[in-house]
Amino acid sequence: MRQHVNPLSKNFDEFERIPPLIDMFGDSQLNLHLDVGCAAGDFLFDLALANNNWNYLGIEIRERLVKTAKLKVLKKEIKNLYFVFGNANNILNNFQSKFITKNVKSISFNFPDPWFKKRHHKRRVIQPKFINILSNSMQKGSLIFIKTDVKDLFEYMDYTLSNNFNFKKINTKDFNYSESFNPNKLQTTREKYVALNKLDIFESIYIKI
Ligand SMILES: C[S@@+](CC[C@H](N)C(=O)[O-])C[C@H]1O[C@@H](n2cnc3c(N)ncnc32)[C@H](O)[C@@H]1O
């Protein structure tokens, strides 16, 4: 399976429409967390099974991974987890998805594709326009989490979020994870690899003000 797909390809102009919350989750009133670029969803399966007081939604651009994850949700009868296929930028920029950005308590961008070459930076999932759209519809107090092992990418994402006046950076050391979407600080697939290889992790949290 291809590791990197170009999110700007015309193939992703069309995307799956996100169903209403009541069709996605057993209890649509629970706090909602969105993970962008969730790959096969292992992290979200772990979270959903550990925290039945949260709903988890994953968006992933590799269709085969999403199909497999959806089948696994059905087979395991998990009611607080849902996957959507497509380019997160296109999906969340669309007015039909406004209810998601309005309802999320938090969004995570875990180890996004770095797109190292300068001419490919426009393929990075975090873009100023995208962050602006999120900032306009997310509720005050909702959070964005970013995490990566690529320093340059971290600096770029941090710069983009810090330049948006609707978000304020939180010191991760002061952050109380116990009430967050990830109270047990479970690790993503990439994070496990990075930890095993003792690579640096750069992370930050931003609150909508
Ligand atoms: C390096 S992987 C990290 C996966 C996972 N978050 C982790 O931490 O293990 C980045 C993932 O983001 C997905 N992705 C990249 N651009 C995306 C986009 N615009 N919308 C949705 N998913 C995207 C990729 O297909 C890939 O699965």
Image (spheres, helix red, strand yellow):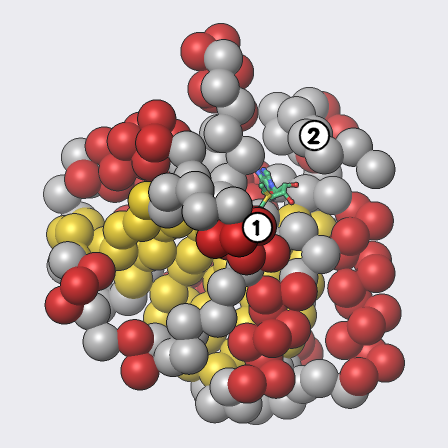
Q: CA distance from mark 2 to mark 1?
A: 21 Å
Q: Amino acid at mark 2?
A: Val
Examine the rendering and report whether any part of residue 92 can be seen: no
Of the two numbered discs 2 and 1 on the same chain, state the one appearing first in sequence.
2
Q: Amino acid at mark 1?
A: Tyr
Q: Residues within 10 Å of mark 1 (few under 14, many from 20)?
A: few
Ligand 1 appears in which quadrant?
top right
Q: Position of residue 7 (x, y in %)?
A: 62, 30
The answer to whether residue 122 is above or below residue 149 is above
On the rendered structure, is 86 left or right of 57?
right
The yes-or-no answer for disc 2 within 8 Å of ligand 1 is: yes
Are dots 2 and 1 in contact, CB under 8 Å?
Answer: no
The answer to whether residue 197 is above or below residue 44 is above
The yes-or-no answer for disc 1 within 8 Å of ligand 1 is: yes
**Which structural element holds mark 1?**
helix
Examine the rendering and report whether any part of residue 169 can be seen: yes
Quarter of the image with the N terminus is top right
Which residue is at a point 57% across and 50% down the rendered structure image?
193
Quarter of the image with the C terminus is bottom left
| Numbered label attached to residue 147 | none
Location of residue 105 (image quadrant): bottom left
Which residue is at a point 23% across and 32% down the rendered structure image?
159
Which residue is at a point 83% across and 49% down the rendered structure image?
64
- Residue placed under numbered mark 2 in the picture: 5
- Residue placed under numbered mark 1 in the picture: 193
Instruction: Judge by depth and name the residue closer to the eye, 54 or 189.
Output: 189
Instruction: Judge by depth and name the residue closer to the eye, 24 or 117.
Output: 117
